[in-house]
Image (cartoon, rainbow, N blue to C red):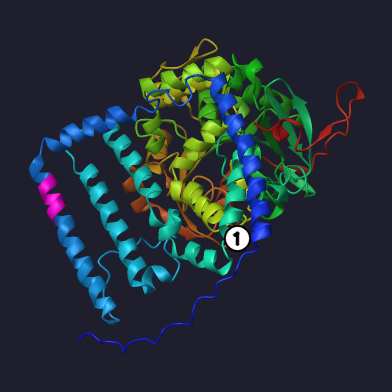
Amino acid sequence: MTKVAAPKAPEEAQTIKTPDPIDMARQMADIAVRGQRVMQQYIEKQQENPQGMSMGDPLNVGHAFMDFTTKLWANPGKIVEAQVNLWQQYTSLWQHSTQKLLGETEVTPVIEPSKTDKRFKDPAWSESVVFDFIKQSYLLTSQWMQTLVKHTEGLDDKTAKKVDFYTRQIIDASSPTNFLATNPEALRLTMETGGQSLVTGLEHLVSDLERGGGSLKISMTDYNKFKVGDNLAITPGKVVFENDLIQLIQYTPTTEKVQEIPLLITPPWINKYYILDLQAKNSFVKWAVDQGITVFMISWVNPDADDAGKTFEDYMQMGIIAALDKVKSLCGVEKVNTIGYCLGGTLLASTLAYLTAKKQIAQIASATFFTTMLDFTDAGELSVFIDDEQLEALEARMSKRGFLDGSEMATTFNMLRANDLIWSFVVNNYLLGKEPFPFDLLYWNADSTRMPAAMHSFYLRNMYQHNKLVQKGGVTLDGVAIDLTTIKTPSFFLSTAEDHIAPWKSTYVGAKLLKGDVTFCLAASGHIAGVINPPANQKYWYWLGHDDAKSADAWLDAAKKTDGSWWPAWVKWLGAYGGKQIPARKIAESGAKGKKMEDAPGRYVTVRS
């Protein structure tokens, strides 16, 4: 029998703080002046770009939703069925809310947020009948919208993915947590602070508009708490080589003995390399050095208009190949172990195929790939941004500047996790008026880089749009037809189970293209957190096995699961290709003509977009 609780006594009146009218007026006047300057900046931007907001439909969303609507109405029976189901659920919700109003305590919710949904963690979302009703109404409507999209027949795969993606964007943006009137925590804080939280939130909004030069650039962390070379990217080392595209960093050894074969890391140039060297506690670079490995890191230039013509081929020749030559020369070796992360891994695989064709592959002892796509058949949610209309619009913007602005890349990646990387900060910064928490990973995430026009267009067209890298000779670099199936280099593929950028099942398909001995490792978490997982954290788990299964699911069924970080398993694997133990290599203090070596992290990584 349902228990009925006794009527509750009225709660004590909420403490309401009376604001200081003079102080608040002063704050509002300052905000108004700053807001006027921001508006002037915005107007000037629009004058420089007359198209401004009238760019039509650069994301090609309208066509996708028109196609979806046409297919949806072709089966009115499905619509009626969905409407009836929604009505029945709402009827259950009204009954649920009525029971709570009458004081019943053991009432099962009609729908609950997922365990990973942090938006509704405030107790009022469950304790208050009104807010509980708002929450469940939102969740039911969201579920109904997504069900309609997923069960609409006749849509091609790309259109279905695009409609599903942007439907989720709409759903996330419409969350009641994003609005003052329907956010209990924001309302409570407004009363407790006498409205000061909203004034502070407005100040934060204006500050972010100022920081974006008239465009909203949401603060994700306290940027004053971090500085590259001060408390980020602090593993000691020297810049031992540079050209127009890279600086090559050699890290100072911390062990008396090291592996004879050094390690060269190629990070993605979509982001800065120090994701692998944040702070001492979570630096992959420092940890690798402490394992007795001579580590070299490529630090890519942050390109500008002068680099517009830099190609994917240039990134191979002036990047990996130039770095390989320098590492071999400095260490007096004929072989080098390599790592490529994300796009850096795609470039590394292309380089391996190139060196194989040139009969120079012997210089690579092993290759490790972090979250790397080679087969782009299923490129995950990023594929919704890749079609002719969007690429033509993107190329038009890049042709004017010579590069893709880093903020555009950042927005794209943030949309993949909108609740975590957009709306949570809107609520925290603007509705609650709180300062963003200092977090090294989010500082790095906001430290975006630009993309040269020629390189980026080549990459998107040939890999993402047409998937030419998996075609024998589909891509040509420096006159050499690239064939990934010729690669016999021993390889280690590290992928992550919740990767939105490089879906692990797609990376597994790509790994099977290589014909050498391939070890595949699947780590828990996502594209960044799954990779940057130091053993000391005692966090997550991983699966390890060879790529001899016919499918990714079959591989996972046979793989061995181990708790903790995958780093020790990787370094054990690398030991087979590290060579003998030798005395640690010292880094020269000066280079050619006695010029003093630049300290790590070097100049290139400190240039901001």
Q: Which residue is drawn at 48% across and 16% down?
A: 396
* Amino acid type assigned to the residue bearing label 1 in the image: Gln
- Using residue 555 as the reference point, say whether residue 572 is left or right of it: right
| Residue at numbered disc 1 | 196
Most foreground residue, 109 or 267:
109
Q: Which residue is drawn at 39% across and 67% down?
A: 125
Give the image location of residue 524, x and y in percent.
Answer: 46, 53
Q: 283 above or below 379?
A: below
Quarter of the image that includes the C terminus: top right
Most foreground residue, 364 or 527:
527
Give the image location of residue 67, x and y in percent.
Answer: 22, 30
Quadrant of res 73: top left
Question: Does the rendering let one see residue 320?
Answer: yes
Give the image location of residue 33, x and y in percent.
Answer: 65, 41
Residue that lies at the very extreme toward the left in this rendered image: 77
Report helix, strand or loop for mark 1.
Answer: helix
Q: 106 above or below 87?
A: below
Q: Which stretch did the figure color magenta?
A: 79-84
Quarter of the image that includes the N terminus: bottom left
Q: Residue at x 90, y 21 (%)?
A: 593
Q: 19 above or below 211?
A: below
- Using residue 76 as the reference point, say whether residue 145 is left or right of it: right
Residue 528 painted magenta: no
Q: Which residue is drawn at 16% across and 38% down?
A: 72
Residue that lies at the very extreme toward the front in this rendered image: 22
Label 1 crowding class (10 Å Cα cut-off): few <14, some 14-19, many 20+?
many
Most foreground residue, 561 or 245:
245
**What secondary structure is the stretch in magenta mostly built from?**
helix
Q: 244 above or below 220?
A: above
Quadrant of res 76: top left
Residue that lies at the very extreme toward the right in this rendered image: 594
Most foreground residue, 57 or 148:
57
